[in-house]
Structures are given as structure tokens and as C-alpha cells.
Image (spheres, rainbow, N blue to C red):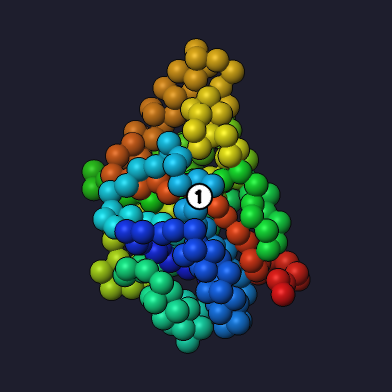
């Protein structure tokens, strides 16, 4: 089983487009028989989030995750063709998945809170082994200890699958309470200003060590898990 994440970029992504992507378009993707499918959209519930950073123009407004038997097979090609009609230059990435904290998904429904998705880029000053060790081994416990995260998925990019895909080294998905879209105390799970300052200081030091303090895109999204390869359940 392989995991492919597709980023979708548009200058505009209104509620009708978001609903179409997680509804009609998702239905067409499911009809292809993909073993797993999740859709993340930057819709009205999260669009004004403070947790937004953008380097790309147009910005990423949605992500579609496919689990498939062959990233190079006809099924994936058909899925990319479908998604190519919905956005400007969709970019697909083959990834490996680590899940330090599984999100509380309910199949076919919007996952509680919101999913903050970060596109990370490895600094040229760090070799791959050092970067991975600082991110996975050193940073993971810091992230879980300093934020109100209740779901944490790390996707390391193996390679891009589409021509001219923006350089991305990792795609991280963290689940937070919905209040965290507009409240730093809620985002970091801080009891007061002093606690917030301490948590932010620790987090910044940790992200700086592997270059995640700059050249990063963060996309607040509503997450929908529509089919999972890890269960016998299937959506209609």
C-alpha cells in the first residue's frame, strides 16, 4: 500500500468549490476504487485562521490523500486527471507516513477541530539523516508537549510525481481544537501568558533546529476521511 498526497492550488476556493471537492469529486475518486481517501479543504470554518503561512502563489487551498496499490498505476493517473480539472497545477507527492498520534477520525464525517497542514522544506545546510533525526526524533516530543495537538501525522516526501511540482520535503498534519484558529493560548494549550511564552520559546527553538521556522506553508483545513485502507469499513 502506498500513500500519495495531492496539493491543490487556486486563487479562489469558495464554499461551493470546497463542497464540490469533498462531495461530487470525492465520489468520483471513490468510484475509481482507491483503497483510502481523505480530503482536506480550507473552507469557511478555518479560512480566517491565524495559523496561515503562504509562500506559494496561488496558495494551497486543499489536499487530497490517496492510498493506492501502485502510485504509478492507472488508478492514480485517473485520480490526478480528475483533480487536474479542479485546480491550478495539482502537485502529487509519494510519501511515507509516520503517525505519532492518530487523529480522531470518524469515517465519512468532518474530523473534530481542524487540521493544520504544513509543507516543510529541508534546508540545504542539513543532510537528510540529520534533518530527519532532528525532526522525527528530537522535535516530535516537543511538538506534542508544547501544543494542544490531538492528532499528528508526519509524511516524508519520497519524490514528486507530477512535473513542476513545488519542492516539498515533508507534509505534516496536526489536529487542533477549533478555538486554536484564532487563539494562541488555545493553539499551544497554554494556561496563561507565561505558560504561552515558555511553550512558544521551546517550540521555536525546536523547529529552528531542523529549518521549519522558515520557508514553510501552513494551511488550516477541515479534514474528511472518506475511506480507510486500515479497516474493513467502507463509505457508501
Q: Is residue 216 above or below residue 213?
A: below
Instruction: Give the structural element (helix, strand or loop) at label 1.
Output: loop
136, 118: nearer the viewer: 118
Q: Residue at x 38, y 51 (%)?
A: 119
139, 116: nearer the viewer: 116
Q: Quadrant of residue 107?
A: bottom right
Q: Residue at x 56, y 29 (%)?
A: 186
In x, y percent, where is residue 168? 34, 56
**Is residue 174 at least partly visible in the picture?**
yes
The C terminus: image quadrant: bottom right
192, 72: nearer the viewer: 192
Q: Residue at x 28, y 73 (%)?
A: 163
The N terminus: image quadrant: bottom right
Q: Residue at x 49, y 58 (%)?
A: 15
In x, y percent, where is residue 51? 43, 39
Q: Residues within 10 Å of mark 1 (few under 14, many from 20)?
A: some
What is the total number of numbered labels drawn onto the structure image? 1
Q: Which residue is mark 1?
A: 44
Q: Is residue 118 above or below residue 234?
A: above
In x, y percent, where is residue 14? 44, 58
Q: Residue furthest top?
A: 194
Q: Residue furthest right?
A: 232
**Is residue 154 at least partly visible in the picture?**
no
In x, y percent, where is residue 62? 45, 59
Left or right of 187, for residue 162: left
Q: Residue furthest bottom?
A: 74
Amino acid at each position: 500500500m502506498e500513500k500519495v498526497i495531492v496539493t491543490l492550488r487556486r486563487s479562489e476556493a469558495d464554499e461551493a468549490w470546497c463542497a464540490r471537492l469533498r462531495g461530487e469529486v470525492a465520489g468520483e475518486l471513490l468510484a475509481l476504487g482507491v483503497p483510502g481517501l481523505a480530503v482536506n479543504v480550507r473552507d469557511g470554518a478555518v479560512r480566517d485562521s491565524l495559523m496561515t503561512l503562504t509562500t506559494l502563489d496561488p496558495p494551497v487551498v486543499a489536499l487530497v490523500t490517496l492510498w493506492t496499490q501502485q502510485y504509478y498505476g492507472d488508478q492514480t493517473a485517473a485520480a490526478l486527471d480528475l483533480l487536474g480539472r479542479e485546480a491550478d497545477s495539482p502537485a502529487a507527492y509519494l510519501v511515507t507516513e509516520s503517525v505519532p498520534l492518530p487523529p480522531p477520525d470518524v469515517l465519512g464525517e468532518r474530523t473534530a477541530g481542524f487540521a493544520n497542514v504544513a509543507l516543510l522544506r529541508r534546508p540545504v545546510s542539513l543532510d537528510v539523516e540529520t534533518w530527519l533525526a532532528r525532526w522525527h526524533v528530537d522535535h516530535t516530543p516537543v511538538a506534542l508537549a508544547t501544543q494542544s495537538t490531538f492528532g499528528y501525522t508526519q509524511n516524508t516526501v519520497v519524490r514528486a510525481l507530477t512535473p513542476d511540482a513545488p519542492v516539498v520535503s515533508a507534509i505534516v498534519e496536526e489536529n487542533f481544537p477549533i478555538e486554536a484558529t484564532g487563539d494562541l493560548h488555545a493553539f499551544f494549550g497554554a494556561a496563561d501568558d507565561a505558560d504561552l511564552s515558555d511553550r512558544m520559546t521551546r517550540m521555536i527553538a525546536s523547529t529552528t533546529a531542523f529549518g521549519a521556522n522558515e520557508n514553510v506553508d501552513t494551511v488550516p483545513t477541515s479534514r474528511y476521511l472518506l475511506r480507510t485502507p486500515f479497516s474493513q469499513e467502507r463509505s457508501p
